Image: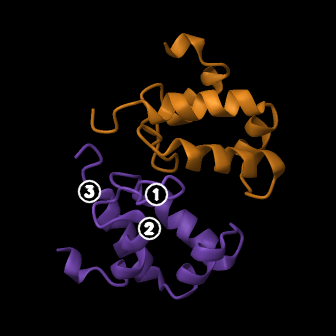
Chain colours: A purple, B orange
Amino acid sequence: QSSNVPKLGTCITCHGRDGIGTSPVFPNLAGQKSLYMVQQLELFRSGARKSEMMNVVAKSLTDAEIEALAAYYEGLDPGK
Amino acid sequence: QSSNVPKLGTCITCHGRDGIGTSPVFPNLAGQKSLYMVQQLELFRSGARKSEMMNVVAKSLTDAEIEALAAYYEGLDPGK
């Protein structure tokens, strides 16, 4: 199913395809609340939440892509 | 062990004693990377990351309390 998620390739470098951060500074997203992730991606996109990496990445995302990415990560098992 | 963690009582209203957010807008913290949580609490404390709730809460935290809270939440099982 992950192949249907737009722009997932950009996310997985840091947050993993399995939603586990690939280094200690990258948060895990597996099983995270999708509404929280949508809100944060909107804040990154607008620049209200600052992150050199995430501000650039989020700027390219549409509302629909944000919803799809948040749903994908919420659907992963955080305990695997 | 949670009784030894300073100011945990402030956190659990939204993030749960078990690290699972108590509403869809509150992120899960169970098993989250402690370094990420330390960085974000420092950003909330300085005001660089904006949140009406978290800016007030983080302002009261010392560096040692931030470390202890991050370690507590990282140590919880996200899959329970």
State which mark lies toward you, 3 or 1.
1
The residue under the point 47% across, 25% down is B17
Residue A17: image quadrant is bottom left
- Inspect the image, locate mark 3, and give the three-letter code of the amino acid beneath it: Leu
- Residue B69: x percent and y percent? 60, 30
Q: Earlier in the sequence, mark 3 or mark 2?
A: 2
Whole-number angstrom distance, CA of label 3 to CA of label 2:
16 Å
Q: Given the image, what chain letter belongs to the residue carrying mark 2?
A: A
B9 left or right of A65 in image: right
Q: Is residue A61 above or below residue B23?
A: below
Residue at the spot of label 3: A76
- The residue carrying mark 2 is A14
Number of marks in the image? Answer: 3
Question: Which circle, 3 or 2, is nearer the viewer?
Answer: 2
- The image position of residue B22, as x and y in percent, is 46, 37
Question: Which residue does the numbered mark 1 point to in the structure image?
Answer: A23
Q: Earlier in the sequence, mark 2 or mark 1?
A: 2
* Tags 3 and 2 touching, CB below 8 Å: no
Distance (Cα) linking label 3 and label 1: 18 Å
Residue at image position (28%, 38%) is B79
Label 2 with label 1: CB-CB less than 8 Å: yes
Residue found at x 43% / y 30%: B75
Label 3 lies in what chain?
A
